[in-house]
Image (tube, rainbow, N blue to C red):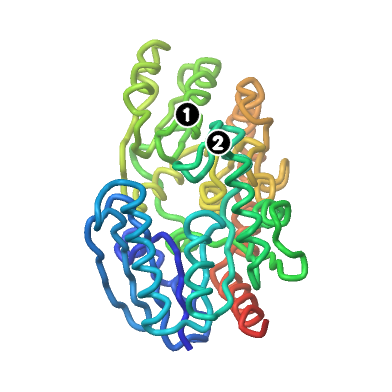
Amino acid sequence: MHLLYFHGSTLRAYDAMGKMAFLEALNPRALFDSVHMVDLDPRGRTDLEEVRGRFRFTSVGLERLGPGRLAKLRALRQAVVRLAADPRPELVVGDDANLLGLSARWAARRAGAPYALCVFYDNDLHHRLTGRGALGFLSSRRLEAALEWIVFRGATGVYGGNRGYLDYGLRHGARPERAHLGSWSVDEIFYADPAAAHPDGREVFFVGRLHPLKYVEDLLDALTRLPPEIRLDVAGEGPHRSRLAERIGALGLDGRVRLLGLVSREEVLARMQAARVLVVTQGFNAAVESLLSGRPVVAYDHECNAEVVRDGETGLLVPFRDVGALVHAARRVLEDPALAARLGAVGRERMLEECSIPASIEHRRRFLEGCLAG
């Protein structure tokens, strides 16, 4: 059997993120003889291919026939026709209900096979925060939602990485009898025994892309209300870096905040261990990784964070963008070592149970077998 998977990632990305073990979750117990992972590169001018065991990775260059929208659509059509036939898949999967999902539906119709969807984001939330849809070439969220309904409705199965994402799929057309609640897992390095603390760590640590939707400015504002000996390290890179640097200077925080840029996963783990509190603003993946560190976590009640950061049990949860509440929660952790130790220990214990890679593999196996059975 052959699985065609519009996944949006490359073999290089899997290697870089330390997620090679997670490939087993995409083909649990070697359910498929071969898996073709397809990434759609909007600026790529050639198709790139790599093979690793049963997995074949293709990055489709959508600018292969030119940069315009019609040229990209023609390039996508050619790729879909080829992918649906060589070899013919028994199942097609898309990792969203947008471009990847539409491509999966298109390829499945060409191949005469069923298609399924995996949901790892909430596009309603994206629109509320940005005023834009996930598909940049559509100006209307209403039109985008109509396309999502068609894609969700026709899927033989819909997999949600957590309850919030599955509920988003159900709101937009996924059939309840075909919906599967899975589990979330992260890079395998986070499940190892905690690393030694970094010798140059700071009291508060944040890791994430430097983007407006990560709300790093909130951390800077919070720091101005914390004692002057409390310092912040920010690991990550992105388009918001220069603006954050200006804000740090304007607030007089040059000696208390460091923008570390991109650092290795090993250094991230070491700096987590050195910190007295980890802050999560946006990103479910970041919440799970932070909890696995065994350090106390303070998080915004945003996106799906509340599913894993349970207030007073695995961490402290505060209202979204309430800087005063963020300061209060950070003070509680900083001033109460017993509370910090308990939250860190329970948070790691729960994530090892609920978000393990084996659990994710088992959920995927049940889901894929159900899709094949119809």
* Residue found 32% across the figure and 69% down from its top: 58
Is residue 319 or residue 67 the one in the foreground? 67
The x, y position of residue 291, in whole percent, is 57, 50
The x, y position of residue 187, in whole percent, is 45, 61
Place residue 114 in its image quadrant.
bottom right
Mark 2: amino acid: Thr
Q: Secondary structure at mark 1?
A: helix
For label 2, the residue is 281
The reply to whether callout 2 and callout 1 are in contact (CB within 8 Å) is: yes
How many neighbours does mark 1 have within 10 angstroms: few (below 14), some (14-19), or many (20 or more)? many
* Picture mark count: 2
The x, y position of residue 372, in whole percent, is 61, 83
Is residue 12 shown above or below 299? below
What number is the disc on residue 216? 1
Mark 1: amino acid: Val
Asked if residue 160 lies left or right of residue 3, the reply is: right
